[in-house]
Amino acid sequence: MNFLIMGLPGAGKGTQAAKIVEKFGVAHISTGDMFRAAIANKTEMGVLAKRYMDKGELVPDEVTNGIVKERLAQEDIAERGFLLDGYPRTIEQAYALDETLSALGLKLNGVINIEVNPESLIERLSGRIIHKKTGETFHKIFNPPVGDYNEDDYYQREDDKPETVKRRLDVNIAQGKPILDHYRKVGIVSDIQGNQEIDAVFTDIEKAIVAIK
Ligand code: AP5
Ligand code: MG
């Protein structure tokens, strides 16, 4: 099964993607995670991506389309299926994805759209903490790590500063609607209420996936 997970910054894409991958075994492809890995490895692409990400802007389409195309062409995808997280983010990326999938003989089965009240997102992003070793995402209040908590084992994302978050939200609100409209036309969008407990959101996503299967 091949899916997209969409939603504004902080909607819970990464949190839910981890649960979907655990349950359904698909490959998680997060363009944000790929760029952050490139930044950590100080690659040429990482240096370029950082310039945009630090300002809350989108990395240029040709760069982003290229890395997704390369990843989707790898062997495991046809066997396991994929869950794209944070891509497409512009209508041009959606068209590029259509072309890539058709060239690879892959079909998109569903789009999971997490709908959230934008006012709740600042609080979610300012409290987000990520485990340095495992990359697992938590929230200081809404989803605290279990067991002993040592602040030094976690980091906060550079782009989770309030000024950058505001720009990320503006950019994503402006770009999101045409993408959803594109997929609504073919009737593959499942709207999920994201302002619920994490497990309740996942229950709704599971139901939507099972209905698609
Ligand atoms: P990316 O990494 O994709 O970031 P984003 O879309 O801004 O989304 P986030 O990862 O911040 O949020 P999320 O929805 O995954 O939420 P999470 O589960 O962590 O992109 C970063 C940047 O990379 C972009 O700004 C851009 O520059 C670049 N980029 C990436 N893709 C690109 C593309 N296609 N084209 C161009 N540029 C691109 O949850 C957030 C917090 O809330 C956590 O603390 C979590 O514990 C908590 N939480 C989750 N669910 C709930 C809940 N139900 N209730 C309470 N708290 C919750
Ligand atoms: Mg994420």
Image (cartoon, helix red, strand yellow):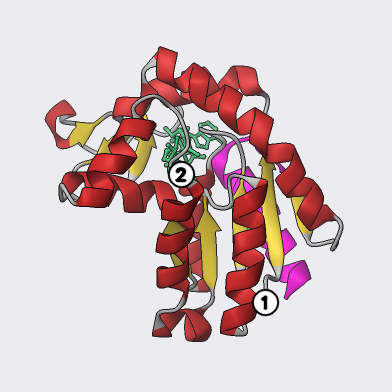
Residue 204 visible in the picture: yes
The spot of residue 144 in percent (x, y) is 36, 32
Q: CA distance from mark 2 to mark 1?
A: 25 Å
The spot of residue 204 in percent (x, y) is 70, 52
Residue 106 visible in the picture: no
Ligand 1 lies under 8 Å from the Cβ of mark 1: no
The quarter holding residue 190 reads bottom right
- Nearest to N terminus: mark 2 or mark 1: 2
Residue at image position (15%, 30%) is 150
Locate the N terminus and report the quarter of the image it occupies. bottom right
- Determine which residue is flagged by label 1: 107
Residue at image position (45%, 78%) is 73
Residue at image position (59%, 23%) is 170
**The residue positioned farthest toward the left in the image shown:** 152
179 left or right of 123? Answer: right
Locate the C terminus and report the quarter of the image it occupies. bottom right
Residue at image position (57%, 28%) is 171
Q: Which mark is residue 24?
A: none
The spot of residue 30 in percent (x, y) is 43, 54
10 left or right of 151? Answer: right
SS under mark 2: loop
SS under mark 1: loop
Q: Is residue 106 magenta?
A: no
Ligand 1 lies under 8 Å from the Cβ of mark 2: yes
Q: How many marks on residues?
A: 2
Q: Which residues are magenta?
A: 192-213
The quarter holding residue 97 reads bottom right
193 left or right of 76? Answer: right
- Determine which residue is flagged by label 2: 60
